[in-house]
Amino acid sequence: MTGSPKKETRPPDAPRAILAGATGLVGRYLLRELLTRTRGDGDPAYREVVVLTRRPLPDALPAGLDGDRVQEVEADFTRLGELGEAVVADHVFCALGTTIRKAGSRERFRAVDHGLPMALARATRAAGARHFGLVSSMGARSDAGTFYLRVKGELEEELRGVGFPSVGIVRPSVIGGPRGEFRPAEAVGRVLLSLVPGRLRTVHAADIAAAMVTLALEEAPGVQVLESEEIRRLAKG
Ligand SMILES: NC(=O)c1ccc[n+]([C@@H]2O[C@H](COP(=O)([O-])OP(=O)(O)OC[C@H]3O[C@@H](n4cnc5c(N)ncnc54)[C@H](OP(=O)(O)O)[C@@H]3O)[C@@H](O)[C@H]2O)c1
């Protein structure tokens, strides 16, 4: 990967991260956060970030990001078990997802939003990962009335059973940030949500990324679930 203007150290005792969904809105901010977060002594918080994608990342990382610490792996998410070293990490971040419209059917949506995160969780846990960070959604419940929220709720429940010592689940309302495509429903939602209480208001992807990385570095035992207001609070530090 190119685009690194400065050389940084790679502290051998710092964790290795896996990121899935790095080409998406939250994923792009997660990659930035994973590369820029530092620890108390000023060294990078992560020694390496393995980016699992189905298509290459843009050629150059934004200015100031240390591309030397990024290992890009083009992967078939249904065959992660075959990737060997590439699925070995301390912390895993999952920002995968699609929409029912893009996927073409409920079944295909479920295969991406539930099937791929579960495949990632199982493969990385089997390879020894200790923390799994998931972007879920406000209202995720396995008995939710809407299909989308039911899929998210079922995913959360199954993830709890995979056996990670530490899990961080964020449940944002509508996600804000620069998006390449226009999603009319989300655009309308963003305007309406600017008028409502904090727990329903748009959460910027940068805040989601910051909160997820903080949760991972804390590695609190058990499952931490953050709703929108808690995401913003943790992101602000
Ligand atoms: N948008 C919202 O307002 C909102 C609100 C609450 C929760 N969420 C949830 O938050 C998560 C992240 O959202 P986002 O807006 O950052 O998503 P996004 O911008 O649509 O990015 C989704 C990521 O998933 C990858 N992906 C999709 N289908 C894939 C497949 N079949 N195989 C491999 N990778 C695939 C995409 O890769 P490509 O670039 O290759 O397509 C992309 O990297 C999603 O689970 C979403 O449901 C979203």
Image (cartoon, rainbow, N blue to C red):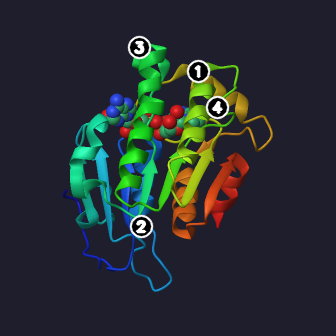
- Cα gap from disc 4 to disc 3, whole angstroms: 24 Å
Q: In the figure, residue 126 lies in which quadrant?
A: bottom left
Outermost residue to the top = 105
Q: Which residue is mark 1?
A: 185
| Label 2 environment density (alpha carbons within 10 Å; few <14, some 14–19, many ≥20) | some
Q: Which residue is mark 2?
A: 36
Q: Position of residue 107 (x, y in %)?
A: 45, 17
Q: Which residue is mark 4?
A: 190
What amino acid does circle 2 point to? Answer: Thr
Q: 203 or 78: which is nearer to us?
A: 78
What amino acid does circle 4 point to? Answer: Arg
Q: Which residue is mark 3?
A: 104
On whether ligand 1 comes within 8 Å of the CB at mark 4, the answer is no
Determine whether the residue tagged by mark 3 lies in a helix, strand or loop: loop
Asked if one can make out residue 78 in the rendered structure from this viewpoint, the answer is: yes
Mark 3 or 1, nearer chain start: 3
Determine whether the residue tagged by mark 4 lies in a helix, strand or loop: helix
Of badges 4 and 2, the one in the foreground is 2
Against 63, residue 111 (above or below) is above
- Cα gap from disc 3 to disc 1, whole angstroms: 17 Å
Q: Which quadrant of the picture is home to ligand 1?
A: top left
Of badges 4 and 3, the one in the foreground is 3
- Cα gap from disc 1 to disc 2, whole angstroms: 33 Å
| Label 3 environment density (alpha carbons within 10 Å; few <14, some 14–19, many ≥20) | few
Determine whether the residue tagged by mark 2 lies in a helix, strand or loop: helix
Asked if one can make out residue 63 in the rendered structure from this viewpoint, the answer is: no
